[in-house]
Amino acid sequence: MSAPRYFPTTGHLLICQNSNCKARGSDLLYRAVWNALEQDKLAYYKAGGSLRLTESGCLGGCKSGPVMTCYRTRDGQMEEAWYAAVDFPLARQVAQAIHDEAELPGERRYGP
Ligand code: FES
């Protein structure tokens, strides 16, 4: 058996798809972000792309959804960021910042 192909990435976005976030549109948000990563060639499987996007179970911020978290390595350190009340423009901004290895947006960010 051969090993699966490994795709190097700059970061990983997770968008909650549990019931409270779905009631606030996280399923539409997920599809819109997926389409944008595809179209703008930011998805890891596109030439030049570097991002992974995954549906997530509850991320613990149910009253403030849609909740999104992201992880990346920057300057040799693991960085995580959590976002509440995420809409498409914010998610797209976060995705671009990860891809560009830039500062993550502070808007609606919580946690570490
Ligand atoms: S349902 Fe999305 S954070 Fe709990």
Image: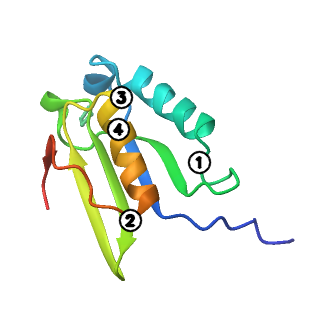
Coloration mode: rainbow
Please tell me whether mark 3 sits on a helix, a strand or a loop.
Answer: helix
Residue underneath mark 4: 91
Q: Are marks 2 and 3 in contact (CB under 8 Å)?
A: no
Instruction: Give me the C-alpha separation between circle 2 and circle 3.
Output: 20 Å
Instruction: Give me the C-alpha separation between circle 1 and circle 3.
Output: 16 Å
* Residue 43 tag number: 1
Could you say which is closer to the camera, residue 67 or residue 10?
10
* Label 4 crowd (10 A; few <14 / some 14-19 / many >=20): many
Residue underneath mark 2: 72
Q: Are marks 2 and 4 in contact (CB under 8 Å)?
A: no
For the C terminus, the image quarter is bottom left
Query: In the image, which is nearer the foreground, mark 2 or mark 3?
Result: 3
N-term mark: 2 or 1: 1
Decide if residue 82 is on the left or right side of residue 35.
left
Q: Are marks 3 and 4 in contact (CB under 8 Å)?
A: yes
Residue type, numbered disc 1: Ala
Decide if residue 89 is on the left or right side of residue 6.
left
Instruction: Give me the C-alpha separation between circle 3 and circle 4.
Output: 5 Å
